[in-house]
Image: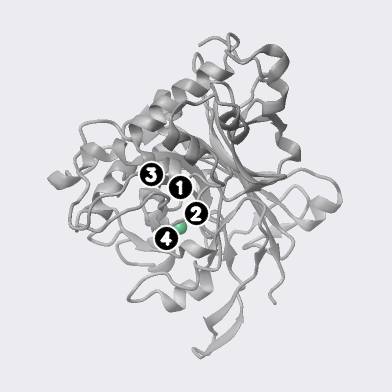
Amino acid sequence: MSGSWVPVPAGSGFPLENLPYGVFRAPGGAHIGLAIGDRIFDVHVASRAGLFHDADLNAALRSGSLNELLALGRDAWVRLRRRLQELLQSSSPIAAEDRERFLVQQFSAQMVMPFEVRDYVDFYSSLEHATNLGKIMRPGTEPLLPNWRRLPVGYHGRAGTVVIDGTPVVRPRGQIKSESGEPEFAPTKMLDAELEVGFVTGVGNALGDPIPIDRAREHIFGMVLVNDWSARDIQAWEYQPLGPFLGKSFATSISPWVVSLDALEPYRTAVPKQEPAPLPYLRASEDWNYDIALFIGLRTAKMCGENVTAEVVSRSNSKYLYWSVAQQLAHATSNGATISPGDLFASGTISGPEPDSYGSLIELTWRGTKPLELRSGETRSFLEDGDEVTMTGYCEEPGKPRIGFGSVSGMILPAH
Ligand code: MN
């Protein structure tokens, strides 16, 4: 692909081949935009300028969120991507003297939620994470429960508390079992972050009609980074027998840019060997994992005060996932449950095989028994007030365009 008329700095995760969608605050209301280089191409302004020729598409592009675009379906997404690449390439039909008015600097833009989250599901799809958690929570027993290799385990989370990058997280209070065995109501002492990716759905299905695994592509629009904040002490007391509840629902952060499946296509890869073989409704005819390098950065209040950048405490990759996005979607609708434009399905914490690739603090510090020793001289078992967690992700391979996700950050504020 030839280059863009928008300057794309070397090493940028936002070349012409990516074009992730986000929503930012503009003077008249929220606008949909695309990240390119260190700019945003204002799609709302482009629509007003008559650069798209479809009434439904124009209505969707002038709305302040991606939900209407998600509802238009895959044919519309493919046509739009082709048109946007045409508009942004060097030989653009937009006259050179007219181009600047479509651009906004990313650093000065305030990003808002890219879509209204309709339903939120969190899976548990990393074999290494599930094994580590089993060893930590149920020592001396078989770490994986008998269903784990048979189906993508998940739970329905809280859509209303999914928040955008940069939103502070207030340390939650909750019921915590004390040493004596009596519960107390107190601020969590075991606040954790979970490194995840999530997919966003488009067109839904009719109630009662499962989505067959090989039609997943028609329903999945793209992916974001997800930090599924977790209060481990609240979770440990409440989770039996129905699963996570208040230990998870206080906040879930997502990155502002939704990267389309089409942009990720060069980085599609196989899932690890699945043994025993999944039931037929979970067998896909295509490879459905993605090679996305993922990182957790931690910056304490002390590091912030000394103007030190975040320290990377974990290096993982979404290719480690045992259950793929297509398997997750097929499973979630296998009982006939519906999905809608704007549903978010998170992968579950993604841990790799090595201890420095674990995707949560409870694993990195083995439930606080091996605290992290930071370059600042501080140690961390779990998150403290003033700590800022930043997760980043990108796809990179020689000879292929770099496809960036940007990042998702959140700072811990003291309990109210
Ligand atoms: Mn999670």
Disc 3 designates what residue?
71
What amino acid is labelled 3 in the image? Ala
- Label disc, if present, on residue 116 of the rendered structure: 2
Disc 4 designates what residue?
133
Q: Are marks 2 and 3 in contact (CB under 8 Å)?
A: no
Q: Residues under labels 2 and 3: Cα distance?
A: 12 Å
Question: Which residue corresponds to the image point at 58% horizontal and 13% vertical from the top-left?
Answer: 92
Point out the tag, 2 or 3, that comes first from the N-terminus.
3
Assign the C terminus to one quadrant of the image. bottom right
Question: Which residue corresponds to the image point at 55% horizontal and 40% vertical from the top-left?
Answer: 62
Is any part of residue 351 visible from this angle? no
What amino acid is labelled 2 in the image? Glu
Q: Are marks 3 and 1 in contact (CB under 8 Å)?
A: yes
SS at badge 2: loop
Point out the tag, 1 or 4, that comes first from the N-terminus.
1
Disc 4: residue Cβ within 8 A of ligand 1's nearest atom: no
For the residues carrying marks 2 and 3, which lies nearer the camera in this image?
3
Relative to residue 193, is residue 301 drawn left or right? right
What amino acid is labelled 1 in the image? Asn
Q: Are marks 2 and 1 in contact (CB under 8 Å)?
A: yes
Is any part of residue 238 visible from this angle? yes
